[in-house]
Image (cartoon, rainbow, N blue to C red):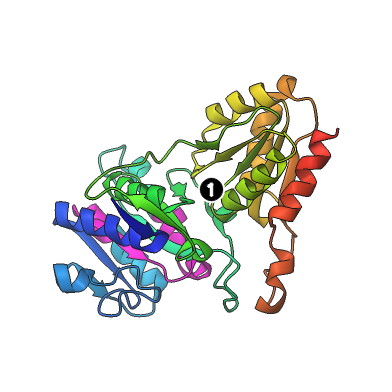
């Protein structure tokens, strides 16, 4: 097994699906010769040709409109939206078209589209480049939303996404791209698109997180362990659907929970997780549900984003508050 960064694990997964299925296509802004703005598709055009990996005009609505037509005629498109903030230009293609088409055609026509898009703070990008916009999409019936938190899951989930017959919004965290490495098996393997993962077992408190906040939560678990406090950390991985069974089993064991997200607190994934726990597992709780999230404001300028983003200190403070309840 080779040690790969998060971004190279995705590249490796894309290489696998392109090699296995001639109906897979990668396209988007600068994804061809340049290999994408972050080089996620680097080398794939040279290997598979300009008919399989190609650049498009700077038109997100056109990119996803093309995806819908291709999917309807037997292809498996893998479009890239260069930054998640640019999905605003193509919301109708995602929510109004590709997510509804299986329903419209009574299940007779699938939409096997994997929309890749980078997101997330901590890298001091320009406006509209770092926003966590998953809250706009997790409530869209017919659309899967996933975001791996480590290189191993990144490769396995991109392969699963491309092979799935539902449209998948595949969110790639910018901060994780080159900040971590995992041992990655060669060739093909898959990771489910609808299950959470217990990345650290514990007995005193559950921390539910996703994407970069999983790593922040693991830092907190390490620190609490120095005081013999055992924190269980769950990586959601799938934001729609949410694997509530894994969460409920953990809460039943620990009786205390903190839900963490990088996005603004209003509504969204963290609110849904808290709501599910309150509705179905409240009798297992010995304390209120703790929540950690960004402020309900527009994403700030790069100069102050580190103060705005939730981090390990914020998670630790909330965890100690719930533990002491």
Which residue: 65% across, 42% down? 221
Horizontal and vertical percent position of residue 23: 16, 56
Residue 198 in view in this figure = yes
Q: Quadrant of residue 212?
A: bottom right
Q: Which residue is mark 1?
A: 138
Q: Is residue 226 magenta?
A: no
Q: Which residues are magenta?
A: 69-97
* Quadrant of the rendering where the C terminus is positioned: top right
- The one of 200 and 54 positioned closer to us in this rendering: 200
Q: Is residue 73 magenta?
A: yes
Dot 1 falls on a residue whose secondary structure is loop
> Around disc 1, counting alpha carbons within 10 Å, would you say few (fewer than 14), some (14 to 19), or many (20 or more)?
many
Instruction: State the predominant SS element of the stretch in magenta.
Output: helix
Horizontal and vertical percent position of residue 240: 50, 43
Horizontal and vertical percent position of residue 211: 54, 52
Which residue: 55% across, 46% down? 139
Q: Quadrant of residue 48?
A: bottom left
């Amino acid at each position: 097994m080779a040690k790969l960064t998060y971004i190279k694990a995705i590249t490796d997964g894309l290489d696998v699906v392109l090699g296995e299925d001639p109906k897979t296509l990668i396209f988007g802004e600068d994804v061809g010769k340049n290999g994408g703005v972050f080089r996620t598709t680097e080398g794939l055009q040279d290997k598979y040709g300009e008919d399989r990996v190609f650049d498009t005009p700077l038109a997100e609505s056109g990119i996803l409109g093309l995806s819908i037509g291709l999917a309807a005629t037997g292809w498996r498109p893998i479009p890239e939206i260069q930054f998640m903030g640019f999905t605003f230009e193509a919301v109708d293609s995602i929510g109004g078209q590709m997510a509804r088409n299986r329903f419209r055609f009574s299940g007779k026509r699938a939409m096997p589209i994997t929309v890749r898009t980078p997101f997330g703070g901590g890298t001091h990008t320009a406006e509209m480049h770092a926003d966590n916009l998953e809250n706009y999409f997790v409530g869209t019936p017919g659309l899967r939303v996933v975001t791996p938190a480590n290189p191993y899951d990144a490769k396995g989930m991109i392969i699963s996404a491309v092979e799935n017959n539902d449209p998948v919004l595949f969110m790639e965290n910018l901060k994780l791209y080159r900040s971590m490495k995992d041992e990655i098996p060669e060739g093909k393997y898959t990771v489910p698109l609808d299950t959470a993962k217990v990345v650290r077992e514990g007995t005193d408190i559950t921390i539910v997180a996703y994407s970069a906040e999983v790593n922040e939560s693991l830092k907190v678990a390490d620190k609490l362990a120095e005081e013999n406090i055992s924190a269980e950390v769950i990586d959601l991985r799938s934001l729609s659907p949410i694997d509530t069974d894994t969460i409920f089993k953990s809460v039943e064991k620990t009786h205390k929970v903190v839900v963490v997200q990088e996005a603004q607190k209003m509504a969204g994934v963290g609110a849904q997780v808290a709501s599910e726990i309150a509705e179905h597992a409240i009798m297992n709780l010995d304390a209120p549900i703790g929540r950690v999230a960004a402020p309900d404001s527009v994403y700030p300028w790069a100069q102050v984003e580190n103060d705005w983003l939730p981090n390990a200190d914020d998670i630790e403070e909330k965890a100690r508050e719930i533990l002491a309840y």
